[in-house]
Image: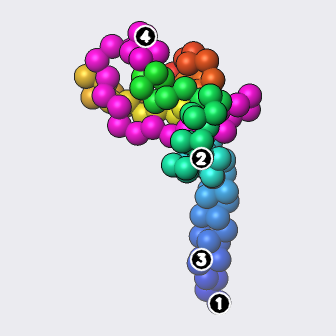
Amino acid sequence: MPVSRLPILLIILGSLAAATAPAFAADAPSHACLNKAEQHAAIQSHKAISLGQAMKSVRQRIKRAELVRARLCRGGSGLVYSLTLLGRSGKVLRVAVDAGSGELINQR
């Protein structure tokens, strides 16, 4: 009697998906990001600097990169700008900027 391979395949695929899910969740904290109204309120109440000020801080360390995407998100210690930049060489950079102080937190 032949054994169906479909249940075994589904189990393997399910375990692979479960193993990779946390990695994707760490790269995309969109559930913790502010909408436009919340962003505006945070900047007006001086809880966050403007995106222009954050980019000015980034450009001191990273020259010649074009902003592709910017999100203002809640981080562990406050608000953080999560920026995606495209370098002149074509390399995609991900940068986090403390939205309160404008300091570069990390760069990947």
Q: Which numbered disc flags the more N-terminal residue, 3 or 4?
A: 3
Picture quadrant where residue 86 is located? top left
Residue 95 visible at all: no
Q: In this view, does 54 lie to the left or right of 31?
A: left
Q: Which numbered disc flags the more N-terminal residue, 2 or 1?
A: 1
**Residue at the disc numbered 1:** 1
Q: Nearer the viewer, mark 3 or mark 1?
A: 3
Is the C-beta separation of discs 4 and 2 under 8 Å?
no
Q: Which of marks 2 and 1 is in front?
A: 2
Q: Which of marks 4 and 1 is in front?
A: 4
- Circle 4 residues within 10 Å: few <14, some 14–19, many ≥20: few
Q: Is mark 2 on a helix, strand or loop?
A: helix
x%, y% of residue 53?
46, 21
The amino acid beneath tag 4 is Arg
Q: Which of marks 2 and 3 is in front?
A: 2
Q: Which numbered disc flags the more N-terminal residue, 4 or 2?
A: 2
| Residue at the extreme right | 77
Q: Which mark is residue 38?
A: 2
Q: In this view, does 50 lie to the left or right of 14?
A: left
The amino acid beneath tag 1 is Met
Q: Which numbered disc flags the more N-terminal residue, 4 or 1?
A: 1
Q: Which mark is residue 61?
A: 4
Q: Is mark 4 on a helix, strand or loop?
A: helix
Residue 46 visible at all: yes
The amino acid beneath tag 2 is Glu
